[in-house]
Amino acid sequence: MTEEKETDKVKRNLYGRRRGPKLRENRAALMRENLAEYAAMPVTGDKVIDLNSLFPGVSDIWLEIGFGSGEHVAAQAIANTDTGFLACEHYLNGIASCLAHIEKNKLNNIRLHNGDARDLMDHLPDASISRVFLLYPDPWPKARHHKRRFISPENLDAFARIMRTGAVLRVASDIPDYIEWTLEHLAAHSGFVLTGDPAGGFREPWSDWPGTRYEAKALREERTPAYLTFERLAQ
């Protein structure tokens, strides 16, 4: 990794809450006792993560960014036991919740990154990821905060580097402006193509979609989610 790249990383800001209410003792115990076992690997210096060592014998590696309480990544890990899951979340309470899912379901195909997903992506090998999930990301609705949105030219370049040809990027949101923002930014990037039927407004969830609490909240508040799928084009 170049000196310039390391400098860029130092300048990054990560917004949003780091922690919420005090963890219940059982969740705090999971953080103390289990987090190291399920951690994705240090992401310091110029080291590239050895995914074969992290997930021995798996056929694919999927990445979820901002997994909230972890119900989606846990459901996917249960349904796809031959797939390795890298799951990123800055919010400590979300990490604790995901650890509870891992313990309850005896999952060994999830590795957690408690921090900035961009730092993890910097250390992933080229063309190593076959699916990326960005589900109900913070929309940062105020115009002056749009630069904080995860869908950006810089992050799409990072996706393009780490995703295999034919890999899939799934984005779900219930905010019309963020949906439009996503469509515009992906259309402007040469590495991706939108799949599905635009005429339907992308209102149908994916066939393996287990639902999340964020989706349930959106539906309760009468907001209509969209489920966008993009394919990584040949490199």
Image (cartoon, grey):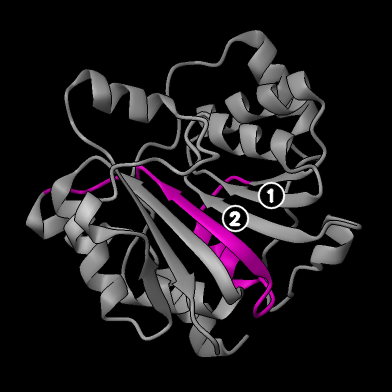
In primary-sequence order, the first of circles 2 and 1 is 2
- Viewer-nearest residue: 10 or 231: 231
**Range of the magenta residues?**
113-141
In the image, what residue occupies the spot 80% across and 26% down? Answer: 33
The residue drawn where x is 58% and y is 60% is 131
Residue 136 visible at all: yes
Q: Position of residue 208 (x, y in %)?
A: 55, 39
Which residue is found at the position 59% from the left and 24% from the top?
97
- As measured in the structure, the alpha-carbon distance from the residue carrying label 2 to the one carrying label 1 is 6 Å
Badge 2 amino acid:
Leu
Position of residue 122 in the picture relative to residue 228 (left or right): right
Where is residue 153, by image quadrant?
bottom left
Q: Compared with residue 120, is residue 204 higher up or lower down, i.e. above or below?
A: above
Up/down of 183 relative to 56, above or below: below
Q: Is residue 96 magenta?
A: no
Percent position (x, y) of residue 46? 69, 79
Is there any visible trace of residue 147 in the rendered image? Answer: no
Residue receiving disc 1: 85
Relative vertical location of residue 6 with respect to residue 143 in this rendering, above or below = below
Q: Position of residue 184 (x, y in %)?
A: 21, 70
Residue 63 image label: 2
Name the foreground residue: 157 vs 173.
173
Q: Amino acid at mark 1?
A: Phe
Q: Nearer the viewer, residue 151 or 187?
A: 187
Cβ–Cβ under 8 Å for marks 2 and 1: yes
- In the figure, residue 37 lies in which quadrant? top right
Locate residue 103, reporting x and y percent: 77, 23
Quarter of the image containing the N terminus? bottom right
For numbered disc 1, what is the local secondary structure? strand
Residue drawn where x is 64% and y is 33% of the image: 74
The quadrant of the image that shows the C terminus is: bottom right
